[in-house]
Image (tube, rainbow, N blue to C red):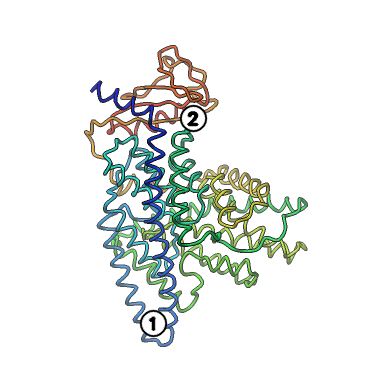
Amino acid sequence: MKHDTSQMIKREEHLPVILIGEGLLVGMIGGLIVLAYRIALKYAGKWMDEIITFAGQSPVRMAGWLLVLMVLAVLVGLLVRWEPMISGSGIPQLEGEMAGKLSQKWWRVLPAKFAGGFLSLLAGLSLGREGPSIQLGAMTGKGISKLLKRDRTEEKFLLTCGASAGLSAAFHAPLAGVMFSLEEVHKNFSVSVLISVMTASITADYISSQFIGIEPVFQFDIGNVLPQNYYWMIVVLGVILGCFGAFYNWFTLTVQAMYKKVSWLNEVTRLLIPFTLAGIFAFTVPELLGSGHELIDLMTDHKLLLGGAIFLLAAKFVFSAVCFGSGAPGGIFFPLLVLGALTGGIFGMIGVNYFGMDPDYINNFVLLAMTGYFTAIVRAPLTGIILIFEMTGSVSQMLSLSIISIVAYIVATLLKSDPIYESLLERLLAGRGELKEEGSREKVLMRQSVMFGSAAADHEVGEIQWPDHCLLVSIQRSGREIIPRGNTMIRAGDVLVTMTEEQYAGEMHDEVREICEE
């Protein structure tokens, strides 16, 4: 046992270099898988449009498409029943695995998520590609870890690399991929993980760009920087988005709970609801179908009137919640950006109609609202700012983007709205989560950064009440490794490397994090 522990610590010393090579491998394979998924969804949207055009020519064909949707709902439901971890976006499942509270079978999740996401978007459900892309990338990382026979500690690094590669390839946003995987998934900014994640993200983006191109996802004109005399409107919009984001989180969780309260609904029958709605909207309001990219184009091209924009916002909001709450494989990332864009566009049109604002600045508020709404819901402001300027190619709005993110974040926090992915993870663990098997004796190394004002900062090792089954093996400070003793002083900014048995990893993760955070 001592020999195994010493081998783990010795490998830990060379881990940053090892992870660069593994990050490159994960970025290559994960990037190709997510690229294939992105191309498949592109064809799904194209085929859906062609089918709706053809079926809309007669009532018999309409009925035929509704029947096909019922079959698709059953197929997707059976996939979810076969592998429950593909339900929803996949990001809560990844966060649960990183915390040691869930375990996913990568060889089942990869094909099931790919197929389930494709069929859901082919049907027109209001879901996004980003969550599935992140889960696909992460499961690629886990698969590579298993094939290379890496330990649990290294596996978590590869999961993070895969998540970064997934978001990068999905949105042509390598920096956002890095920031999201660190800010939301790994929750640690150590140098070793940063370099490996950057390697995976850039590699995946390069591979994706060779096939998709380097054009930003959103291509709309933002002619002028918003003048400072309009900044009071940014604050007002930030307050609105903070409230709207808190309501979104509550409504999404409420719809999810409503599905589960109905006794006769299961993995298959509950999917019949959104698939049926998609069939109805296909011949009445087709703008609501899919992730909603076309709605942003309509708004930024100024082709929507105020009343129409408000209707589409309300309908898209409800339809997205119904689709996601059903457990269909798909994310909320892109649809919430669409809802934010519609909110910003409506706010801008009200400013033009009632407050004399120059119409040229409507698109500025569309851009700002996407960032603010994302921040209020996900509570990852840096990711939101970087993601939007990468997806739009606009770097001239950084100050206003920062302001609206701060305001939306503060308002959502004051309203006591928990981040959506953390709330979804709690629901998952309380319900059908696949808990890790008890009794595993494998050792796991974990890292946690020490924050200013935490219980660990400016205290000696011996003064801290460490969790049971926890061994502090090293302290990383300014690139140096310190072997801890009872009188070793812990400083803010240190990275603590702790070790435990795999069966205690989830519990220890939370307890050590509580010691190290404010």
- Location of residue 183 in the rendering, given as x and y in whole percent from the top left corner: 49, 41
Residue drawn at point x = 46 percent, y = 67 percent: 290
Residue drawn at point x = 64 percent, y = 72 percent: 305
Location of residue 372 with respect to 122 vertically, above or below: above
Q: Which residue is mark 2?
A: 517
The label shown at residue 62 is: 1
The residue sitting at the top extreme is: 487
The picture quadrant where one finds residue 442 is: top left
Location of residue 472 with respect to 41 vertically, above or below: above
Task: Label 2: state its secondary structure.
Answer: loop
- Mark found first going from the N terminus, 1 or 2: 1
The picture quadrant where one finds residue 262 is: bottom left
- Location of residue 125 in the rendering, given as x and y in whole percent from the top left corner: 42, 66
Q: Nearer the viewer, residue 328 or 442?
A: 442
Looking at the rendered structure, the kind of residue marked 2 is Glu
- Location of residue 111 in the rendering, given as x and y in whole percent from the top left corner: 30, 58
- Location of residue 61 in the rendering, given as x and y in whole percent from the top left corner: 37, 84
Looking at the rendered structure, the kind of residue marked 1 is Met
The label shown at residue 370 is: none
Q: Quadrant of the N terminus?
A: top left
In the shown orientation, is residue 157 left or right of residue 480?
left
Mark 1–mark 2 Cα distance, whole angstroms, equals 56 Å
